[in-house]
Amino acid sequence: MLMSPSSPFPPPAPSASPPTRRGYLCEVWHHLTAKADDPKAAKRTDAILIAASVIAAMNFQAVISPPRGIYQETRYNLKHQIYKAGEAIGAHLDPQAYKNFYLANTISFTSSMSAMFLLLCSVSLQRRIFTILTTATMFAAITATTYSYALALESITPSQERSWLFVQKIVTIALGGWLVVATLIFFGFLWTQYEGAPTHKWLVKHVPALRNFIIHA
């Protein structure tokens, strides 16, 4: 009986199938909660604490000393109170702009306080999940502080002169560009924290342009 000669070529390897949604989430969770070897974790903790403390102090000072100042005395008009001492002048002159400033300042204050609370609870930044949480809160705090700065600058800048309007536009464009760069850096940081996960190779294979952009940026 004649036997057919074996093929000199090995059988093709089965193609790697993309991970399921449940398996993907489990792999990501185990990767984020695992302890990473990060020798700079202690220095990063000190830096975040200092930055969060400074931002929180700035936000508190902005509340008690808002743009355009506060009224020094109470004023009445035909026995009806117009404003009272201690109220923000900007809240009466431009209520919507003051509400935006108030909201941005509050977001920045609560985000910086949240970052300080996480670090004071002795969470380890060697675990990626806590590193991402603290970095996200600081990103929100810095972004909100930038927006409140732009609102404060707009409220005290003369709007009648064209030269000031030109400067204001330049500042707005610069702050917008900074926000775009900061957002790209933040998502690049998230990518580096995810690197090493089991599904990372599959993502790199399907999104090579994103990886090359972050690595070579």
Image: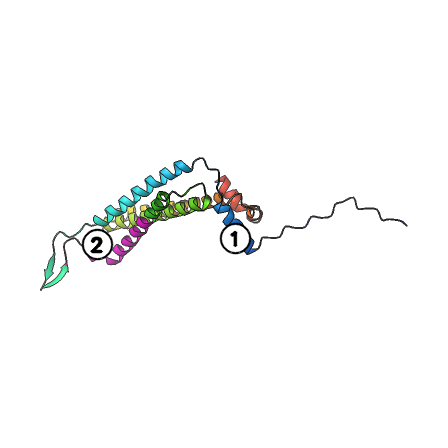
Q: Which residues are magenta?
A: 83-110
Residue farthest toward the left in the current orientation of the protein: 78
Identify the mark at residue 25; answer none if there is no mark: 1
- Residue type at numbered disc 2: Gly
Query: Residue 20: x and y, percent?
Result: 57, 55
Q: Which residue is at 53% across, 52% downward? A: 26
Determine whether, in the image, residue 69 is placed left or right of residue 78.
right
Residue furthest front in the image: 121
Residue nearest the observer in this picture, 208 or 105: 105
Prevailing secondary structure class for the magenta stretch in the rendered image = helix
The amino acid type found where label 1 is placed reads: Leu
Q: Alpha carbon of mark 2 to alpha carbon of mark 1: how far?
A: 48 Å
**In what element is the residue under mark 2?**
helix
Q: Which residue is mark 2?
A: 90
User: Is residue 108 at all visible to an observer of this figure?
Assistant: yes
Q: Residues within 10 Å of mark 2 (few under 14, many from 20)?
A: many
Q: Is residue 62 above or below residue 46?
A: below
